[in-house]
Image (spheres, grey):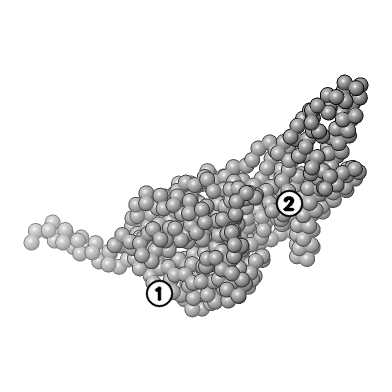
């Protein structure tokens, strides 16, 4: 055999040996499972709440994404503070999964989960581990802008208020503008090798708190959306919703009093819009899987000055209330009359004209007095509405101030995680991030398919922007927060670092 032929044969054999010893491209495998976590002893149930688990393996890396139809991962609601450490401990002991590679996201629906939610979560992950199959992966996005609204209102005074059921809205003529929304749906698609879809992870920013007409237990908007997605994909496909930066994003028409409250139409629209995005995604053999989980120390705020300022405002508002001859019984009929007829509200026009012909203005004088009393009564109503907003937010500030004192330190440690699956990149935070945070991170991200999730691996209340935290009007997000304004720059710097490493 010629020497050159021998060299070619040897080279071919060596290349085959190298491929067989691990230089071949890693394979991505995935498994999914879900377990019902509805508390069926808590009253009527409209639709079930689920814990869903997605396990991913590539080479030596294993990652688990868990989604909960619950308000939060600890701190508030029915998922207790020992939930996350308990789940991680059991999964490490039973399956050898590193605790830091387990990400748990709460949808932030206000459904009531069962007491043994931790045990059922572990069950879901174990079932997902038993269901591992080779998959192809793809990342993409959908668009939905019809179902949500920014609940922060910028007032003409320069202050900001927010849309809540806990108190009344400011007067219409006091509102100057509203904040942005994020219509992007971030999507991770995982297909079996035969083309059947195994799982869809979708990330979107909105409070799923619309409820259902009966008021029964529900997974709300995102529960309905996941059902729509699953019903229109391959048999057994699972949709896992990951809550985004929805801290200041409400369902649209949140204060509507003309129609029954129903999450289903909104969820259906979100599900269909997600499906449109899913169908545009082509999956491939990209087996990249990276998990980064770091502890970040953030500054806590001392709320003393804010509490003092709002209590001073409360005192000012109380002193501004004035006496008026009217009460609700006399006020309401006057409002109707004086809006039906501007010139002749109290009786037919001929009586006014007759009075005037006789040289009298008795009707006009009475109308002037009534209008003055109505103006004073309306002013008192608006002041009382403002007082309810101030008092509610003072209570939130005092709660977190007491927590600061009890903690004995001016900082809080939180988990910040990064997950990379193929082209899909996700960064997480345990607080209720407001939408501007997410929009800013995605705009600056080095990866085109970068998405942001709040409500993950714990719960530390609201995480507004530094500017929002300085709002003198005190919206809920600004008061129901433990963070000092400097937190935002620290967090965003860490996120930029994580994204470079993913």
In the displayed orientation, state which residue is furthest to the bottom: 94
Marked residue nearer the N-terminal end (2 or 1):
1
Question: In this rendering, would 252 be left or right of 284?
Answer: right
The spot of residue 241 in percent (x, y) is 50, 59
Instruction: Please name the residue that numbered disc 2 is placed on.
Output: 167
Height in image: 302 above or below 218?
Answer: above
Q: In which quarter of the image is the N terminus?
A: bottom left
In the displayed orientation, state which residue is furthest to the left: 1
- The residue under the point 77% across, 54% down is 392
- The residue under the point 70% across, 39% down is 172
Height in image: 68 above or below 311?
Answer: below
Q: Give the spatial CA distance, label 2 vs label 1.
A: 49 Å
Instruction: Please name the residue that numbered disc 1 is placed on.
Output: 130
Q: Please say whether residue 495 is visible from this viewpoint.
A: no
The spot of residue 5 in percent (x, y) is 12, 58
Q: Helix or strand or loop: what does disc 2 sit on?
A: loop
């Amino acid at each position: 055999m010629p020497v050159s032929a021998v060299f070619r044969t040897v080279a071919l054999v060596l290349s085959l040996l190298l491929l067989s010893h691990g230089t071949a491209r890693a394979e991505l495998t995935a498994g999914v499972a879900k377990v019902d976590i509805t508390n069926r002893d808590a009253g009527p149930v409209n639709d079930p709440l689920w814990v869903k688990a997605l396990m991913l393996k590539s080479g030596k890396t294993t990652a688990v994404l868990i989604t909960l139809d619950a308000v939060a991962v600890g701190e508030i609601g029915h998922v207790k503070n020992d939930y996350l450490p308990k789940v991680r401990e059991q999964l490490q002991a039973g399956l050898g999964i590193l605790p830091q590679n387990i990400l748990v996201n709460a949808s932030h629906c206000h459904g009531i989960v069962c007491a043994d939610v931790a045990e059922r979560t572990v069950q879901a992950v174990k079932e997902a581990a038993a269901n591992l199959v080779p998959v192809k992966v793809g990342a993409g996005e959908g668009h939905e802008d019809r179902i949500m609204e920014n609940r922060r209102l910028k007032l003409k005074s320069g202050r900001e208020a927010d849309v809540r059921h806990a108190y009344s809205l400011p007067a219409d003529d006091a509102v100057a503008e509203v904040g942005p929304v994020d219509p992007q749906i971030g999507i991770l698609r995982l297909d079996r090798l035969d083309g059947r879809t195994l799982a869809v992870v979708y990330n979107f920013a909105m409070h799923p708190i619309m409820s259902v007409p009966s008021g029964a237990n529900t997974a709300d908007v995102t529960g309905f959306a996941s059902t729509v997605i699953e019903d229109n994909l391959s048999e057994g496909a699972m949709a896992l919703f990951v809550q985004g930066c929805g801290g200041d994003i409400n369902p649209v028409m949140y204060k509507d009093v003309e129609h029954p409250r129903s999450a289903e139409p909104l969820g259906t629209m979100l599900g269909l819009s997600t499906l449109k995005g899913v169908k545009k995604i082509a999956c491939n053999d990209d087996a990249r899987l990276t998990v980064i989980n770091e502890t970040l120390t953030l500054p806590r705020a001392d709320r003393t000055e804010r509490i003092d300022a709002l209590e001073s405002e409360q005192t000012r508002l109380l002193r501004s209330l004035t006496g008026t001859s009217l009460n609700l019984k006399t006020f309401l009929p006057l409002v109707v009359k004086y809006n039906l007829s501007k010139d002749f509200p109290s009786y037919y026009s001929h009586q006014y004209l007759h009075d005037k012909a006789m040289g009298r203005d008795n009707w006009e004088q009475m109308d002037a007095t009534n209008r003055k009393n109505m103006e004073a009564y309306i002013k008192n109503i608006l002041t009382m509405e403002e007082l309810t907003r101030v008092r509610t937010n003072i209570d939130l500030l005092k709660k977190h101030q007491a927590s600061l004192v009890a903690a004995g330190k001016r900082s809080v440690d939180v988990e910040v995680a990064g997950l990379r699956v193929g082209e899909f990149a996700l960064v997480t935070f345990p607080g209720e991030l407001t939408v501007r945070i997410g929009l800013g991170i995605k705009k600056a991200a080095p990866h085109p398919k970068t998405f942001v999730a709040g409500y993950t691996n714990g719960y530390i209340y609201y995480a507004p922007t530094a500017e929002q935290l300085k709002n003198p009007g005190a919206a809920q997000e600004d008061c129901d927060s433990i963070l000092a304004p400097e937190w935002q720059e620290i967090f965003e710097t860490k996120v930029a670092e994580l994204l470079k490493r993913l």
